Image (spheres, coloured by chain):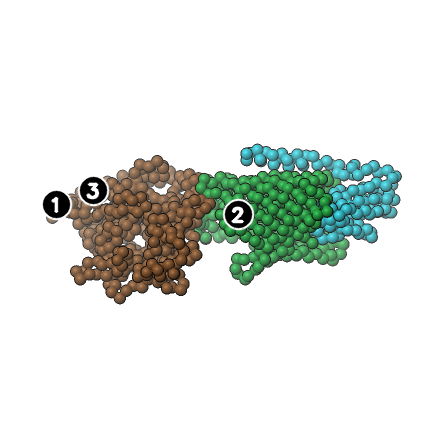
Chain colours: A cyan, B green, C brown
Amino acid sequence: MRRSFWLVCVSVVVSALGTAPPGGLAAQQGTESKAEPVVRIRAERFTFTPSEVRTTVGTRLDIELKSDDTVHGFRIIGTDVNVEVPKRGKGSVRVVFTPTTPGRYTFECSHTCGAGHSFMRGVIIVEAK
Amino acid sequence: MEFHYNKPEFVDGELDFHRFVLLVTHRYSDRIRFVGELEVAHAFVEGLEEAGELELEQAYLDFLFSRGLNIRAGLMLMPVGIINERHEPPVFYGVERPLVDTALIPTTWFEIGVGVHGEVGRGWRYRAFLTAPLDAERFTAEDGLRDGRQKGSRTNAGRLAATARLEYVGTPGLTTGVSVWTGRSGFQFRPRFDVPVHLIEADARYSFDRLELRAEAVQVSVGNTPDLNDAVGRTIGIDPNVAKTMRGGYLEAGYRVVSGARFGDIGAFVRYESVDTQHRMADGYLPLREFDRTAWVVGATYWPDADIALKFDYTMLRNRSVSIVAPNSFNLGLGWWF
Amino acid sequence: MRQMVAIHRFRVAVGVCALIFTTALFTSITATQRVAPPGDPLPGLTVAEFEAFRLGLDDFLEVESAEEGLGPAFNGPSCAACHNVPAIGGMSPIAEVRAAKRGPAGEFVALDSSGETLFHLFSIPNHGCQPVIPDDATVIARRIPIPLFGAGLVEAIPDETILALEDPFDRNRDGVSGRAAIVRDLGTGATRVGRFGWKAQHATLLTFGADAYRNEMGITNEIFPLELAIGISSAQMRRCDPIPDPEDRRDPRTRLRGIDNFESFMRLLAPVAKLAGSTNIADVAAGEVAFHAAGCAVCHVPVLMTGPSVNPLFDRKLVPLFSDLLLHDVGTGDGIVQASAQAGEIRTPALWGLRLRRPFLHDGSAATIDEAVRRHAGEALLARRGVERMTPQAYRQLLAFLKSL
């Protein structure tokens, strides 16, 4: 029993690490076309997934945020985007962000959500067209 | 915050306000933050009596330079395992922490230190800290490393410990990580000898819709246990019989049977745990098989609100002893966060 | 007279041969075994035995409370309170008190109809059941704890071995008339040769431990189910200590009683090994010869052997205890009659581990080994004269030998 337990444990972890796609989420969020892409960001203690969003200058980003657990915040530093992500079961929140300058825009959780609250950060990478 | 009713076999049940936690944060600026966590454990702290504990669990400054590099300094949580950094009650199934997260990863594990953390690429998060070590004089056969925590209180920092964690969080719902902790923990002993402690851990957490799966595996090695056992035996009168290798882990599956209903969510879970704090002994030492433990835990959680969890579980504990029966226990807990 | 000298010389020769043989055998055995420090279990335990030893050690250390049955009168709140030097299972200078009186012809008369002589040092609050030594006591004796190291090996010595050593009528005319203590073991009901306790009042560790649990701590058990406190009526006893008897309960997790744990602990405790790496090996060796030459080894027999056993730990093992386990009157008796022992008799103390003990004699009244040796009289008179006739150098070597044990 014990040996098979260890085998299962190790194989679960290894296969989980193995299935981590290097490409992340950029490919899953919808095509980057001139139509507004909807970026679905999942917030949970203490991660935003995806934590890296790529877009181009002038593209309107529709960001839909949902929490897996408690109330989180979503704030894009340097802009006036700062919303509360409602707790699980209480729906989602949508924000619109249209970057006018290329650069890296850090976003973070702005509602204290627990011990690792400071780790909840991400970046929107805005490239020039 | 959480309080518990624990009823193990053979003894009376116990009602305990297990943890009352206050989290304090302060933004100096966009780039400098303070985070503090104060906990009152077991409700009542009375001078020198061994009643509850009033402890500062976190008190650090984060200097946030960029996504990829940030500096943290102060009293911080060790980045080891799933639960140590992520232990708010509504976030894990089961009333008590898994055995491996009490004996091998002494949750809640916090020490004073300094280090870096950040995220690179599409979800590779890292932390690397230098901290005060554990105190090997307090290692035991039953509780492994647990009592060795210095907890930031006048800690000996003659030799610093190093800890690091690498996580991948790029796939939605999946978090996998590997942690290491290494530190020379024998500072109490005269004449001096080293007790190097190495911990390696791997874990994975996957949640998809209503399903949540977790797995964790830990191995600890303690060096120089013959000298350690001998020195502690001479101080306290009994040989603590500390092992040179300890191992543990668990597999858990949880499912939200009811999700999104008006009255809340209900989830059920099952967990298989294993912890052996006497896995391998130094030459001339025999293991205490009472501490080679496995457990099946089944239970459920009711979330009337995403931040409130009413939990119950039944833990069936087994050990490899020939004469000591491991008690099963029934546990009930109410935990909340705001 | 010439015959006595010849017999004496013969005994010395036999002693020296035995010494050489057993030293050779002993060193060859100890060379292959790890030398356990005092307090360690016997080497070669199985994992299950180690667990039983640790369970026993925990219970031995456990401080009992009045709610658990301690008292109403007691000498210590845990076994380890008195048995802890140089390690748990050892001794200490704490002395228990026994009292009795002498009849018109100087004979021993107990102060209690049951024949008991123990007067406890302490009692649980409010001290309503503290035994009081009555006015007519004319014998007061103290006894210090005996180290328990090697007790399992001693238990495994067959009765026949001890009986073969006795010579109650001194048929060999060497002045020594050791007597085996025949006792009834309450645990098994069997008639056995006692070997534990200053008066060799117990034959098995289970009964020895159970007796101590009740006597020293006031915790009644299945072998000794009644409280003991001289002069206290049972009604008063129940008021002071309302915990129902027997107070020693089976632990639900292990299904073992406290007395079972004590038995395991004592049984598996290793004996104290001789001092290794002595700087004056020559003196120690010469001292050992002197020990035999003086006749000390007649009672302080260097080695006995355990009987056959299914457990390899106790199967035909040498027990280098330096005692014949017999009762002797060497003039240091405490005046207390107990079990099979008369007032002046004491069981030959084992000298293994002597270097780690202080003070000496049953009542701790000898501060040094030298003083203890010089107090020997009665059956030990001839041997003491032999010691007094030694040259100062030989005596110094004798002391060096004794301090190496």
Q: Which residue is mark 2?
A: B8
Q: Please, is residue C77 above or below residue C183 in the view?
A: below
Q: Horizontal and vertical percent for residue C104?
A: 17, 62
According to the picture, the residue beneath numbered tag 3 turns out to be: C13
Give the amino acid at mark 1.
Gln
B57 to the left or right of A69: left
Q: Which residue is mark 1?
A: C3
**C-alpha gap between disc 2 and disc 3:** 67 Å
User: What residue is at 58 percent from the left and 42 percent from the top?
Assistant: B297
Q: Are marks 2 and 3 in contact (CB under 8 Å)?
A: no
Q: From the viewer's perspective, is the residue at label 3 or at label 1 nearer? A: 1
Q: Residues within 10 Å of mark 2 (few under 14, many from 20)?
A: some
Q: Secondary structure at mark 3?
A: helix
| Amino acid found under the numbered disc labelled 3 | Ala
What residue is at 27 percent from the left and 39 percent from the top? C21
Residue C87 drawn at (x, y percent): 40, 51
Residue C30 location (% of width, % of height): 35, 40
Residue at x-position 32% and y-position 46%: C187
Viewer-nearest residue: A105 or C329: C329
Check chain identity for marks 3 and 1: say if they share one: yes
The answer as to whether the residues below labels 2 and 3 share one chain is: no
Using the image, determine if residue C112 lies above or below residue A32: below
Whether B28 is drawn above or below C280: the answer is: below
Q: Chain of mark 1?
A: C
Residue situated in front as seen by the camera: C358 or C166 = C166
